[in-house]
Image (cartoon, rainbow, N blue to C red):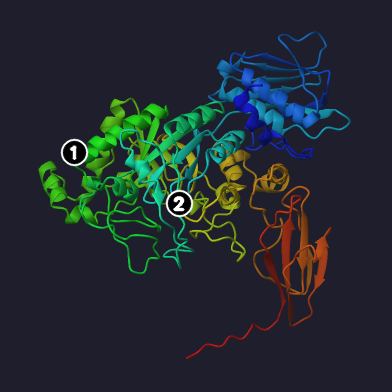
Amino acid sequence: MNKALSIFIGVLISTSAFAQSDPNLGIIPAPVSITRANGNFILDKSTVLINQSIDGAKSADLLNAFIVNKAGFALRESKVPQPSQKSILLTSTGSDKLPAEGYTIKVTTNQITIVGKGAGLFYGVESAMQMMPDKIADKITIPAVTIEDYPRFSYRGAMLDVCRHYFPLSFIKKYIDHLAYYKINTFHWHLTDDQGWRLEIKKYPKLTTVGSSRNGSIIGNYPGNGNYLTPVKGFYTQDEAKEIVKYAAERFVTVIPEIELPGHASAAIAAYPELSCFSDRDTFVSDKTPWAGSRKGKQVQQTWGVFDDIFVPSENTFTMLNNILDEVIAIFPSKYIHIGGDEAPKTYWKESPFCQALMKEKGLKDEHELQSYFIQTIEKHVNAKGRSIIGWDEILEGGLAPNATVMSWRGEAGGIAAAQQNHDVIMTPGSMGLYIDHKQSNSPDEPVTIGGFAPYQKIYAYDPIPKVLTADQRKYIKGVQANMWTEYIKTPEKAENHAFPRLLALSEIAWSPVERKDLKNFSEERLPKHLARLDQMNINYWVPTPIGQSDKALSGGDFTIDLKAPVKGSKIYYSLDGSRPSENAFLYTSPVKVTVPQGEKRLLRTIVIAPSGKRSVTTETLLNNGAPEDKTTTKK
């Protein structure tokens, strides 16, 4: 088996048999169409694996390794099927008629045929693996079916911020494995920001010797109630970045690097103060900010937010940024180079005699137009290298660069405006649940987050194509992305907790047709099995709360509590006595009838415990039969 794929195999071990009633056969994201037929294919030791595709050797290896883990035996491989021989056939014949990244699967009683090429064949193999139930007596029974599938959007992305906190190479690979498994084809790597510069640039070594380390970080929500007083450091060498690019490409994932400009530049300015409008000014640090180490000179930021010290638009700055981008372009073959462009305060530009003189010289009426000049200057260089820039929706301010793609994060307005100007758009609005660093429930058990509320159901409900766009304008919406900012995500384990199950919801809105979306089927049929797989892999996913429990108070005297476990094999425990539920509380096994006398109330509290022992937050439902409101006293 190809060594580069060996780590990926662990991601692919599926869980128990899908319910025959599940129209999607356990597959996430839901395919475009599934047509059932009569009979079953029995996968056993007599089955032969045949690869007749142009580029499917790695996919064939992947499938056989999966079957070894799933069934306990490997399939014999052959070039051609023999008469009446049961086989799994991978072929590229007919793939030219399929949409980009598309595939078909046909299961008969004698053969499973997977048609596709490149990413399409890879995705077809993944879907085939997801639809395989557990073995019974060394056999796996797969229903006869025809699947036709292809993505709704060409760009299906997930962003990871490694600046606020550094994540090891092993975790980056693991993260990419999961993206690929769910047909998410773009990894947006946020590599530079105020709190750390994470990519080696050989021409400017201080970007990492100085800019990749900060002396501390605030404790708790901004502005912080203390400082950890622990250095945060780390960066990726160019060889490591190339390793990630290659690893991702083998899984049909494109890596897009982000080099922030002109704002979010504190780490770069700490390394090279001449990039600032005021190189002699100390980095501003409020007296109220908990701080570690010196406050003198230019500093890598230890707190979160937006900072006034941004790049000066001088020839020296442009030369340096172009040199940096040249090294970045040499590492990353992606069409897009992300240049940030968001949250660039204009305070220093307004105070700078140089900037004001430059604006007069260039005929720029305000600092927004100066930002547009900055972005367009960078774009010309990137375009000359055969690449395109993509940036956050602030790059619209002062006039959009001619060939730029807009990533709409401040709601949908930026994306709508860009599409109306015939610019390509990636939708990633935080208001629609796509900021997966936000909290997943309103329980006090949730860990500290930056705020917001983004349960996976909110992501699932989102349609990335705004209805206000005309049919012609809608073609400019190229895809959708979820973003994980890491101010409050310090470890890989917490990153996993924020990512799952929300990335699974993202995958379905990015891939599946709108008419194929079905939240009930997703959350009650397919998601519990996929979460059980993550549970077996010891992924620190967020355990959902019981399916069917109301998050609002219920009124009445007689209640029937009817719940479903959100993870296959998990248990629900509940209490009615005010205590926090655990294994010591009541085990939920079937619907529970609760009678509340007139004038009284009960508090139903639940917790889900997965097979691994991972736990959900505690969820509460008030059952009220006319009880008087609690009296509160207010001091005058």
Disc 1 element: helix
- Could you classify mark 2 by the number of other residues whose Cα lies within 10 Å: few (under 14), some (14-19), or many (20 or more)? many
The residue drawn where x is 82% and y is 29% is: 141
The answer to whether 599 appears left or right of 471 in the picture is right
Amino acid type shown at disc 2 = Val
Whether residue 562 can be seen here? no
Q: Position of residue 408 (x, y in %)?
A: 41, 45
The residue drawn where x is 42% and y is 27% is: 333
Quarter of the image where one finds residue 628: bottom right
The residue drawn where x is 89% and y is 30% is: 137
Q: Which mark is residue 232?
A: 2
> Vertical placement of 400 versus 84: above or below?
below
Q: Position of residue 142 (x, y in %)?
A: 79, 29
Of 13 and 513, the residue lying toward us: 13
Whether residue 150 can be seen here? yes
Q: Which mark is residue 413?
A: none
Residue that label 1 marks: 315
Nearer the viewer's eye, disc 1 or disc 2? 2
Amino acid type shown at disc 1 = Glu
